[in-house]
Image (cartoon, rainbow, N blue to C red):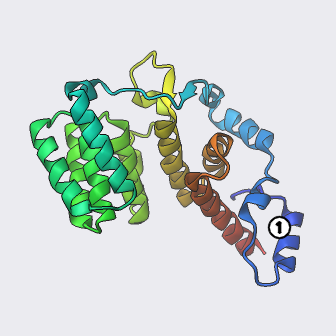
Amino acid sequence: MTKTYINRFKLIYAILDNSGRSLDHKELLSTVDRHQIFKKLEKSNPEMKEFGKFIITEQSLEEENWSLLTEKEKTGILKLYEKIKKSADLADVIVKLLEVKNRYPGVPAIYNYLGIAYERSGKQEQYYDVLIETHERFPDYIFGKISLAEYYLNKNEYKKIPVLFGSRFEITAHFPEGTEIYHISAVRGFYFVTGRYFAKIGKLEMAYRSYFLLSDLDPDHETTEILGKEIFAYELDDFARKL
């Protein structure tokens, strides 16, 4: 039976006292005893002792194939990405990214930006096609796997995720041996999707482990919020069933 980790007395009090307001999931999740969860994980998964033993940086880590582009082309692509984030001129952005992709078919970041542009444009079929193409062409590209995993989660096809990640749920298993420094965006994306997966299947200790890492990186980041709400929803439903 799944254990409820949120303090039950505070949860009951919050339910009785919320007066129709939404429960403060972040406050209630803060009552969870991290030590208790990690202690249980160490018993069931001894290898988890190595969890988090890597360096996270916000400094740019240039991918090897990115160096194939000229500095001018890199600058142009990054400007297109800024437009994508603002959902501006997306039709034009897509055309330009397709041109660059045709010239440089071996640069996975271009596929990643193109996929985001399709998604922002509401072109779901093209978005999915690019996700699959990216993963097939660059099976080791971490952002390709993260994006496809998020697509599966949003489509409630989360059972495909273990196959996608080869049942390896540590980011260190997806980089060359000896890698010590990981970009914050890769760490955040990886533990966001794997945390959501574990919340979906009710493996709360693993889900909380991801949540703690994201929360330590930035408690107010969108990924922390979404994962926290999904864990809380599972805990709340499970608590209601037990009552």
Front residue of 216 and 139: 216
Q: Please state if 152 lies on the left or on the right of 77 as rendered.
A: right
Q: Most extreme residue toward the bottom, as rendered?
A: 20
* Circle 1 crowding by C-alpha within 10 Å: few under 14, some 14–19, many from 20: many
Q: Amino acid at mark 1?
A: Leu
Q: Which residue is mark 1?
A: 11
Residue 194, position in %: x, y?
Answer: 50, 47
Q: Is residue 172 above or below residue 85?
A: above
Front residue of 72 and 232: 72
Residue positioned 57% across, 24% down in the render: 54
Residue positioned 69% across, 58% down in the render: 2
Residue 237, position in %: x, y?
Answer: 67, 71
Residue positioned 88% across, 72% down in the render: 13
Q: Secondary structure at mark 1?
A: helix
Which quadrant of the view contains residue 164?
Answer: top left
Looking at the image, how many numbered discs can be counted on the residues?
1
Residue positioned 52% across, 42% down in the render: 188
Residue 176, position in %: x, y?
Answer: 39, 21
Residue 93, position in %: x, y?
Answer: 23, 55
Look at the image and tell me in which quarter the C terminus lies.
Answer: bottom right
